Image (spheres, helix red, strand yellow):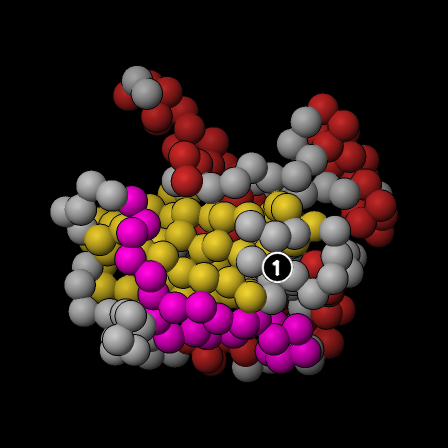
Amino acid sequence: TSPDAALALSAAEKAVAAASAAEASAASAAAAASGSGAGQGDATVGLGVDWAAWGAGAFIDHGHSSGALGRHFTGRLGRLAASFLPQYRELFAAPHPPEVLLAWDSAPPSRCHSMVAAGGTVAIRFPQAVRASHVVIEQTPLWASSWPSRASPRHFQVQAWPADVEIPYSVELGAFEYQLHGQRLQVFALTDTNGKAVSGRVQGIRFIFDDNWGEASLTVCRLRVFGEL
């Protein structure tokens, strides 16, 4: 990839994330007004920096991520229709690119990424190697969901790409379950194969979504990776 192409891609990704942040801020205001979702952000206090945020320099590793559903012409047409008729977003199946998962703000997510119901992957690269300790999956507040909540992830795995290692995502950091009826923001502690906290630095994290809660496709709204340098 040429430097000019890389810069153009980076600018496009940031534009997508910025648009997501603006919409999410409006959702946050609505959440505050209704009183729903309050306090969920407290679960990440003390975890360190969110290295999966685009504002921190993170980006999607498309070469190790599965494609989004609805990214063909009819999918783009559906997204256009949904932008004018948001109440029918589920009907039009309007997914977004995986870059929306890296939104940097603390507002509840309002844009989501859809993929196959089983075996979908999202890989995130960091601007520098970090010591990852926790990952977070956050879904839209129930009051704002226009797609079935059963499309949320259920079982998933996390893999790491260690620093100074050529083989990507070769280290297992745990298998987890996102609870459908739990908090919309759920935190998962990463461990090595011996059940101990991860000590080495990693340059990327990949999520492998094994299944969801019963829908034909899987929808995830925000992914975070916390840790220190």
Left or right of residue 226, residue 32 in this image: right
Q: Is residue 6 above or below residue 148?
A: above
Task: Provide the residue span drawn in magenta.
Answer: 168-190
Q: Is residue 52 above or below residue 84?
A: below
Image quadrant where one finds the N terminus? top left
Specify the quadrant of the image occupied by residue 158. bottom left
Where's residue 206, x and y in %? 40, 52
**Does 178 lie within the magenta span?**
yes
Residue found at x 72% / y 41%? 94
Specify the quadrant of the image occupied by residue 153. bottom right
Looking at the rendered structure, the kind of residue marked 1 is: Asp
Residue found at x 74% / y 62%? 214
Q: Residue furthest front?
A: 194
Residue found at x 37% / y 20%? 5
Q: Tell which of 169 and 58 is nearer to you.
A: 169
Image quadrant where one finds the C terminus? bottom left
Left or right of residue 12, residue 48 in this image: left
**Does 145 lie within the magenta span?**
no
Where's residue 178, x and y in %? 57, 71
